[in-house]
Amino acid sequence: MSMSKLTVSTLAICALAGAASARDNVQIAGSSTVLPYAAIVAEAFGENFDFPTPVVESGGSSSGLKRFCEGVGDTTIDIANASRAIKSSEIEACAANGVTDIIEVRIGYDGIVFASDVNSNDFAFSPTDWFLALSNTILVDGAMVENPNTTWEKVNASFPDQPIQAFVPGTKHGTREVFEDKVILEGCEATGAFEAIMAANGGDKKAAEGACIELRTDGRSVDIDGDYTETLARIESDANSIGVFGLSFYENNTDKLRVATMNDVVPSTESIATGEYPVSRPLYFYIKAAHIGVIPGVKEYAEFFVADEIAGPDGPLAEYGLVSDPELAETQGIVSDEAPM
């Protein structure tokens, strides 16, 4: 075979095999929502197996998947954590860099919740409320105008006369995308703004979606690029503010936070498991198949993560707040068979 016929993937795998001894621990990065679960598993894995404890870093789903797609080799991460499914554009970026066999592992479900200081006002939100509070433009008297709302009372007459101040995940976080799609966009559609924007843009659905989820930039909506601990710190310094969190983080900080309902449903593992709570999403990690059998412990870590004793309804991840996947056995089979997407 001539060198010109060797694919990027083949060359990368050969390089990985030749340099395998350079690294003997699993390296993981990505979602701050998945981070605490991965940290629990990594610590237990290091204690119970003859492998070094995996290194788990945060940074957000998009950031983790970008690092994951940088290529194959011991200088690249083995696993990317994500609070959303990998995008087709990311799969293409991976393939361009030789990452062609990707194993998708769904670990369970989590909810997105809206919480404020534990001593603050109660809120019963709907997607419409959040759209009217945070969207850059809203529909007023049949026309799209710059968002004039400055207090929650102006958004909804049943709310207190409290300044709008929200801390939301930054754009590199998977939680942000779910917040945009399941809250802001739904609110946009419910108010009629989506149709108005479509009409003004010649029926361009993509343009309408983009306009709907464009958040205001006057300081009332603040992007948080760090993890949920940063959002919590912001709320602790401003009792009038409200933050967007993962359910598990809230459930581990109920002494500091007061959670709001969404569509009159209290977020909980039970309401997410039944599908009653409207703002929930599956959580994932992605394995670089080329690293299995080369970087020690990659497959073993993944199998341990999705074992009944760990990710099942009675395991430590459920105890921390993960909603167990009813199809966990199928996921276990995917990992065991090393079945790529």
Image (spheres, rainbow, N blue to C red):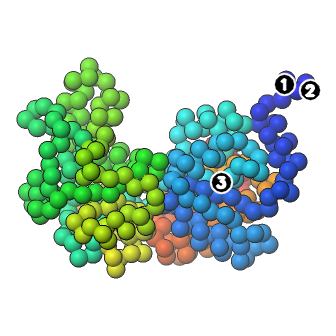
Give 253 or 247, whichever is nearer the viewer: 253
Residue pictured at 81% horizontal, 42% vertical: 13
CA separation, marks 3 and 2? 31 Å
Q: Are marks 2 and 1 in contact (CB under 8 Å)?
A: yes
Q: What residue occupies the far bottom of the structure in this picture?
A: 255
Residue 212, quarter of the rendered image: top left
Is 62 rendered above or below residue 253?
Answer: above
x, y percentage for residue 264? 22, 62
x, y percentage for residue 190? 20, 42
Find numbered disc 2 in the image and state the secondary structure of the residue it sits on: loop
Amino acid under disc 1: Lys
Residue 287 in view (yes/no)? yes
x, y percentage for residue 69? 64, 42
Residue 294 horizontal side relative to residue 178, left or right: right
Q: Which mark is residue 5?
A: 1
Local packing at callout 2 (Cα closer than 10 Å; few below 14, some 14-19, many 20+) is few
> Label 3, on which residue?
79
Quarter of the image with the C terminus is top right
